[in-house]
Image (cartoon, rainbow, N blue to C red):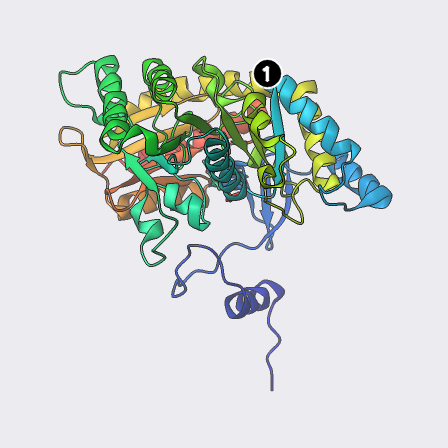
Amino acid sequence: MKTVKNDTQSLNEKDRENVWHHISPYNEKNYPMIASEAKGSWITDHQGNKYLDAMSGLWCVNVGYGREELARVAYEQMKKMAYTSMTQSHEPGIKLAEKINDMLDDDYMIFYSNSGSDANEVAFKIARQYHQQNGESSRYKFISRYRAYHGGSMGALAATGQALRKYKYEPLSSGFLHVAPPDNYRRPAGMSVEQYNLQRAGELEDKIIWEQKETIAGIIMEPLITGGGVLIPDQVYVKEVEKICKRHGVLLIIDEVICGFGRTGKAFGHKHFDIKPDIITMAKGLTSGYLPLSVTAVRKDLYESFKSSEDNSHFRHVNTFGGNPTACAVALKNIEIMEQENLTDRAAVLGNRLQQELEELRSHPYVGDVRGLGFLMGIELVEDKNTKEPASAERIGKIIGDCKTNGLIIGKNGDTVAGYNNILTLSPPLSSTDDDLGFIIDVVKKVFKENEV
Ligand code: PMP
């Protein structure tokens, strides 16, 4: 006779039998949490336990959970017209493109897709086609940085600079090269941050020259490396990369998938660095994760080369769902909420407070570095502060587990192959209340105190 199981247990078992989760090992003893409800910065699981989600899902729920306005806009748009492809056009897509240009404070053409990976694939295809149409068909290679993540599809994964994510899926798209990013915490002793950042930029320029500059189509980078361990470059590095791109006719593609939409305390991460990217990719915070949507924003002058009447100058890339009117309407409302509630400024305020409060962790025996920009923070754990040997997986797992036991979800990021999978990350909703922030600070401090040995 079948035993009647309590509801959560039966869901757990069905989950294990039927759902293929990303990353998680399948022999894990624990079941993944079944999230049931969410409001503000808080998620409730199927058994009624509440957790503050200090990772905003996968760095995306910028306006927080449970926004009825977004649900209403989606409902109204679905009733009116749930779907049309971008073969036609529609009001939400047109208005959203205009709004994104306002936020960028510049003139870009907006191409819609569904995910961050898609947006980067589109960027690569547009860059290659642009060079061809511009009489430079030899330019096909892209340079990105080790430790960066740019997506899971074959081109975006090729751009990704984390070997373990690629291992077993190769060969990926060809023509992707990598250089080391600045990791200021681990810079050589005796070198200033500025000297070191200029050196790293110099290595990038060397790569372009050694590879033959006429073969390089573009450089792709995040304003700061987020998933690879919150590596924040010096101002001088980013400006120098822009200059190098200009000097060698290489397009600068900035991946704003995580940094965009207020996360770093400015509308876009690159706004901290006073640069003008040629192409900008966006996703996540664009809809705060309520619906899938992404954008590849392309400078108008690049677009010009696609406007000839010749049939072969069309951008031959079609996707069924990209620019779905419901997703665009939700994105517009999401941005409106961000503006009404000043969430970009709030990210800066909350981030400063978090950084100030967590500075004291530097005296903890296993904390090597505490760093952040806006409401995005990394805490680098080491076994030994002198050698900077990365903390063991057990030590890191224990801290993450203890935070969860205390009702706080935080992340772990970095790069496994390089041995630097040792950075705890916090990227809470920008709508977090003062009490939410207080809760995050209290739990993190408490857990670190309890893990001093
Ligand atoms: N770029 C960056 C910087 C990302 O962090 C991610 C996803 N975490 C992607 C691209 C890929 O986005 P998606 O998962 O939506 O394909």
Q: Residue furthest right?
A: 80
Residue 92 horizontal/vertical position (percent): 76, 32
Q: Residue furthest front?
A: 310
Residue 407 in sight: no
Residue 127 horizontal/vertical position (percent): 47, 33
Mark 1: few, some, or many residues within 10 Å (few <14, many ≥20)?
Answer: few
Foreground: 31 or 83?
83
Quadrant housing residue 26? bottom left
Q: Quadrant of the N terminus?
A: bottom right
- In this rendering, would 298 be left or right of 368? right
Quadrant housing residue 27? bottom left
Q: How many marks?
A: 1
Foreground: 203 or 73?
203
Residue 9 higher or lower than 361, as above or below: below
Q: Which residue is mark 1?
A: 106
- In this rendering, would 384 be left or right of 393? left
Residue 204 higher or lower than 452, as above or below: above
Residue 306 horizontal/vertical position (percent): 59, 32
Q: Quadrant of the C terminus?
A: top left
- In this rendering, would 19 be left or right of 165? right
Secondary structure beneath disc 1? Answer: loop
Residue 436 in sight: yes
* Mark 1 CB near ligand 1 (8 Å cut): no
Residue 117 horizontal/vertical position (percent): 50, 43
Foreground: 168 or 76?
168
Instruction: Give the residue type that dot 1 points to.
Output: Asp
